[in-house]
Structure formats: C-alpha cells, structure tokens
Image (cartoon, helix red, strand yellow):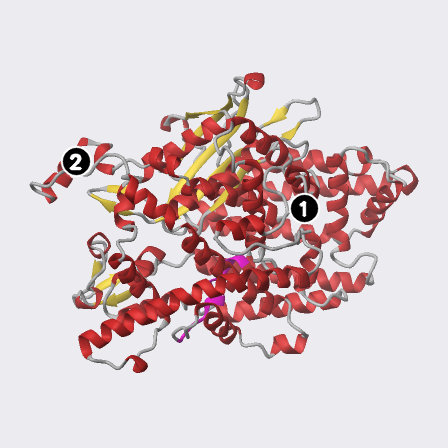
Amino acid sequence: MAQALPTVPDRNDFVPTMEEYVQEHRKILDRIVSTVKPSDVSFENVLLPIGQLENEYGGRKAVIEALRYASPEEEVQEEVDVARKVRQKYSNEVSERIDYYELLQALKDKGELQDFESRTFLDKSLQNYTSRGYGIVDAQTIKTFNEVQAKCNDLCAEYNKNIRLMDPKACGIDFTKEELDGLPEDLLSQCEVQPDGRLRVPLQQQYSGAIKQHVHNGETRKRIMQAFNSKHPENGPLFREIILLRDENARRLGLKSRCEFKLPYRMIESVEWVQDLLVKLWKPMSAERRKLFDAQLAKKREILYKEHGTAPEEVQLETWDTAYYQNIIDREAKAVDEDLVREYFPFLHTFDYMLRQFSTYFQLAYVEIPKDELVGHVWSSDIRVWGVWDKRPDHMGEFIGYLYADLFSRPNKYKGNQAVNLQPGYLNADGSRVYPATTIMCNFALRERHGCALMAHSQMTTLFHELGHCMHDILARTRFARHHGYAVCLELGEALASMLENWCWIKEDLKAMGYHYTAIDPKYMEAWKADHPGKKPPQAKLPDETLDLLISEYPRSKMALYTSILYYSQFDLAVHHPPSAESLRNLDESQTFRDLHEQFYFAHPPEPFHLQTDFSHLVSGYDAGYYVYMLANVFAQDMFSVNFSEDHRSIAAWDRYRRGLLEHGGSRDEKQVLKEFLGRTPNENALLKSLGLSQATDDRAE
C-alpha cells in the first residue's frame, strides 16, 4: 500500500512548524546534556533521540524548503525565508552547545559504534562542531565565527532572491527586426512588440544562445552577451562581501582559505591536489579547443575578405563571434542540424520515454496519479506525480516512493534545474519505513513547432542528469532522514547523476527515444503539411545518418562542457583560495573572470562582464568546490567504463549500481563506497579516453 502524498502547507504554518521543531529539538538536547554523563554515553542516549526527531519532521521541513524554489507566489517564498531564518538561528545556537559537543567527543573516544550508519551519524555530528573550531580555538572565537556565518547566510539568501525574482521579459533587450535577422522564426515570433516597433528579447538562455549562433549582426550578438552576463548588478557588492567574510572566518580558525575550510566536506585530501588535476585535464583539452578557435577565426577572415575585401590580419575573432562562425562551419560540413534533431524529441513524449527507460533498467513501475487526486499536494497545476513501485522479483509490488515533475518555466521559480526532496526516507522506531518523495524541478522555456514543445539534445542530457539525482533520492534506503538520498559529498552525488548522461549518446537508445513530433498527433502532421505543401512528410524515426552525426559530436560537446567547468572552477578557486587575505581584498572579481575567459576561450569578453553576479552555485553550497563537477565527470566516466561499457542495458549491472551506490545514500563514507564499486581508486583515464585524448599513466584520484 502506498503512503499518503506530501501535503503542501498553508504559508501561515511555515514559521510555527519551524518553531515547533526548534522547541522540541531544544528540549531533547537539554534533556540529553542534563541526564547523560560522559562515562555513560551511547548512541541510544546521545544521538538516537535527535535522529528520531529529525525523521519525524523531515518531510514537513522539506516541503517548506521546496516552496522557496517553486511557489508561484512571492509572498509564500518570503515566508519560507522567514521560517528558514528561525531554523538557521537555532542551528547557530546548537553549534555553540559545548556541553553536547563534549558528549559527542566522549562517544567518539569510546569507539564502540559498529554499524556504518551510526558511525556516520556521529562523525557528521562532530564535524558540525570541529569545522567551527571546537578543539582549536576559544569559545569567543567560535561565537564570532557563528555570527559571521549567519551574516553570510543572509547575504546568500538575498543574492539568490535577486536572481529568482528577476523577470526575464521585463529585463529584456529591445532590437529592431533587422537587427535580429537570422533568429529562428519560432523564437522571433515570441518576442513582444514594443510601442516603438522594436522586439523585446527576454534574457533567457534559449534566446541568448540562438542569437549568438544564428543572428548575422555582430553588434546584436555583442549586446545580448553584455546584457546576459551582467543581469544582476545589485549582486556585485553582495558577492564581494560574502567572499571576504568567508575568507575572514576561515583564517579565524587558523586555515589558509575557504577551500581548506570545506575540505572535510569533500572527497579530496588537499586543494593543491585538485588544482594539479584541473591543470592536467586542461592541457590536452586546450589544444583541441584552440584548433576550434583557429578554425572559427579562419572562417571569419574568409567571409569578410570575400564580402568586403577586408585584409585577414585586420580581422579578430570576438567572443560573441565564436558560436556564429562555428555554426557556419558546421552547416558547410553538413554537420548535425540541431533544429532537425529537436523535432524528433517532443518534450512530453521524450520525458515519458525516459521514465520507461528507468522503469526497465531499475525494474520499477511508474503509475501516474490522476490530477484530481493532487489537489492540496502540488503547488502548481502543471505538476505531474507518479507513484513508484518495485518490479524486482524478490521485491515485486513493494512501494518505492513518489516522483514529482515540475518542468516548465514560470514567474518567481528557481531559474536553474535541480532535484528537490519533499520527503526523506527513514525507518520508524517500530521498523516500518517511511518512503521518499522527490521532485525533478526544471526551468525549461521550450521552442515549439505547431504548438508542440520540443527538446534540444542538451536539454535531454539535463533531464537525464536531474532524473539521476531523483533516482538517487527515491531509491536510497537509510535508517535516518539526515542520510537519505543525495545527502552525500557533492562530487559523488553529481557523479551518480552525470553518469546517466552517457545514455544520451548511445545510438540504439536515442533511436528508440526519438520520434518526430508530427507522428505523435495527427493535428501536428496536418499543420506541418499546411506549411510544406507538396513535400514528403518527415520519417517518424530519427534517420541513422543524423544519429551518427549527432553522436560524432560527443567529444566536442563534452569538451565544451568541461571547458566551462574548468573556467568556473578556476574563478571559484581564485576567490576562495587566494594567496592571502590582502590579495583577496585587492582582487577585482570582474577582471578575474575576464582574464580567465581569455585563458579558456582565447578572446576578450565584452564589457560590462560581471558573471559573479549570476553565479548562484557559489552562494548555494558549491562554493570552494565548483570543481566537484569536474571530479564528478571523472568519477562518472570511470563508473560507466567499469560497470556499463560491455552492456549498458544489463539488468545485473543496473542492480549493482542501485545496491552498491544509490541505496546507501549518505550513510557511508563516500570514498570507500566508490572504491568498493570500482574495485580500485578512481582515475581520469576513462574520461580522457572518451574524448579521444591521451590517458594518464598513473592512478591519481584519492
């Protein structure tokens, strides 16, 4: 029997719920420290009561947190922020409980805990104190650290709110129709006509990307890049204050940097190790990326000489030129037609097919919940929900959890793509299980043909990635809510999701998934015929020659992704691992981004160029660790090569992946879990091989 769906609470209940949780938590802590002596500590009297309370309130808190990203109402999101401040204030109070810390340390010194989840619970509870200086600095320093940390949290919330509440249409850029010559008609038709006759282009990725790739006017390409890369000027001072406060706090604890402060939460041993790895990975990639840049420059010089007689030495390739001239090169080489590929991936049809793939691979059944049963359980009418059931022979018919899908852009919604937990799984005291609920939350603004929303191949890989997080969340089986799902080191969590992107590059899977939009509904075929009189309708399945061209793009596509990760990682390291406090105070964040842009993309970006004002990862938990995305891809390709390269559809391989990695959630040491799965320490050889680049000769990863 399935458990009840999560309930969306009234906003007036947010703060009382958090206050109730805080009150109960404080009572339990007070009781523990007043009744338990250091000589009598045990898991049952020091940690279990806390774990059981977290279990009890986990779902209620999770739904409230989710509404911060998803609610269509700004007032609801603001109330979530108030509730979060109640929780954060209390978290700071708990972190100053030296009496509880001493009991945790006494339990650690006993060394009696045998099962891995209990040990993880203790280690992470202690880490909350040791990372703040307990055992290193005095009580006043710890208090100051917590006050500064609280201020940082408030600044981060303000930064993210500015991004979340931006209206991309209101902040759009106006162009004449002539200035937008070359923009695909389906996007052009969606631009609102302004009183002066110009067209407003929203500041959204699909418009920015299409303009840089297709629009002939170089000044238009430059203007959209300038606007897109400087969307939130109000975040500039916030970001600077955040990085200075973080650095100050790290040095307060005797550490060199924020990156060193974050090391206990990562899978690496030192910042220097990861810096060395990033340089080593970039070296072979940079040569390939430089060849691409040189080809684009040559094409621009060829065209300008032919059309205007411009001497080649007078022509430089600007940042806003690269995608445009690459598009010309691709067309002339008859490379893959992205618009044609998009027509074979109608969004809803493709998403449902993905679920069928996961159903087969993980041996699951997805049963969609009727819309009339979702009232009171969703925050927007366009959300779909499935009950998920086990189909493995030894677990047939067992309930797994709920999967929510909140996929489309709307006002006030989180601007990125992510998985969001609504109910962590855990075991009740009587041994019965509470099952998880998770959400794939995206912000897709899709292009359409005849009213049918279509998916670009890059959006497909995003969906696979985020569904990977959801599978981690829904298949984890832990005793405590705090360890559920993707509550792991970021590099492992991202690796488990990134690995699934490989299925977007496998021919037989793409061919099975791809289905021309005109073949899914007669009304689309009729509309297509009306627009193409006398022409033969497109074939229903994606042609083999198109598939082969698409798959051949894998190395270039992945190197573009990895270049972006390396670029942003180096900026993250620059602001969170500076040589000294003084050097950070003198650092110009915008200039640092510009210098790195030239290093990784071989051209100066246009000014203004303030990417730090729209880099939400660095204020949302990925600070001093954006490099985890690169490590995640190293781990992902290693896992794929070890477990799936011989047969990517093997049910035994998928079951091993499920049992060996996903089910543990965050209940075990991540390095040990990964090493057990691979049979050795991970290395970058599989990633380099997948790109056709030379491999390393040693086992590097730790």
Q: Residues within 10 Å of mark 2 (few under 14, many from 20)?
A: some
Residue 353 percent coordinates (x, y): 37, 32
Left or right: 526, with 41 as reference point? left
Q: Secondary structure at mark 1?
A: loop
Mark sitting earlier along the chain (2/1)? 2
Q: Are marks 2 and 1 in contact (CB under 8 Å)?
A: no
Residue 541 percent coordinates (x, y): 27, 35
For the residue pair 425 and 279, the one nearer the viewer reads as 279
Q: Which residue is mark 1?
A: 681
Residue, x 76% and y 61% (percent of image)? 142
Residue, x 70% and y 66% (percent of image)? 249
The image quarter in which residue 271 lies: bottom right
In the image, what residue type sits under mark 2? Met
The number of callouts visible is 2
For the residue pair 72 and 174, the one nearer the viewer reads as 174
**Vertically, is 332 above or below 610?**
above
Q: Which residue is mark 2?
A: 525
**Vertically, is 187 above or below 104?**
below
Left or right: 640, with 700 as reference point? left
Residue 274 percent coordinates (x, y): 64, 60
In the rendered image, residue 35 lying in the magenta stretch gets the answer no
Residue numbers of the magenta segment: 607-617
Left or right: 89, with 645 as reference point? right
